[in-house]
Image (tube, rainbow, N blue to C red):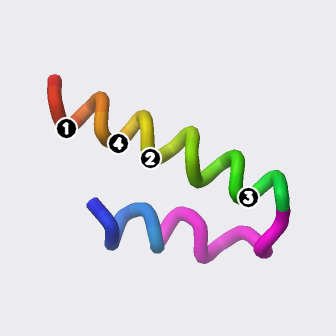
Amino acid sequence: MKLVLQHLTSNFPESEHTNNYKRASTQQQIKSTIT
């Protein structure tokens, strides 16, 4: 899960938008993992 998140976020520069993207994708990853 962490590896997937790192791979997704590594394509984006560090910024406020990226931080929001990280939070959103983390929540989505958790949801899809639980389901």
Q: Secondary structure at mark 1?
A: helix
- How far across and down, in percent of the image, does residue 23 sit? 57, 46
The segment highlighted magenta reads 7-15
Count of numbered marks? 4
Figure quadrant of the N terminus: bottom left
The residue at the point 43 percent across, 37 percent down is 27
In the picture provided, is 30 more to the left or to the right than 28?
A: left
Q: Are marks 3 and 4 in contact (CB under 8 Å)?
A: no
Where residue 19 sits, quadrant-wise, is: bottom right
Figure quadrant of the C terminus: top left
Mark 4 Cα within 10 Å, few/some/many (few <14, many 20+)? some
Q: Are marks 3 and 2 in contact (CB under 8 Å)?
A: no
Q: CA distance from mark 3 to mark 2?
A: 12 Å
- How far across and down, in percent of the image, does residue 11 sit? 65, 72
Q: Main secondary structure of the magenta part?
A: loop
Mark 2 Cα within 10 Å, few/some/many (few <14, many 20+)? some
Earlier along the polypeptide chain: callout 1 or callout 2?
2
Residue type beneath disc 2 = Thr
Q: Secondary structure at mark 2?
A: helix
Q: Are marks 1 and 4 in contact (CB under 8 Å)?
A: yes
Q: Which residue is mark 2?
A: 26
Q: Which residue is mark 4?
A: 29
Q: Which residue is mark 3?
A: 18
Q: Which residue is mark 1?
A: 33
The residue at the point 33 percent across, 67 percent down is 2
Q: Are marks 2 and 4 in contact (CB under 8 Å)?
A: yes
* Residue lying at the far right of the rendered structure: 16
| In magenta stretch: residue 26 | no
Q: Secondary structure at mark 3?
A: helix
* Residue lying at the far top of the rendered structure: 35
Q: Is residue 35 above or below residue 19?
A: above
Q: CA distance from mark 2 to mark 4?
A: 5 Å
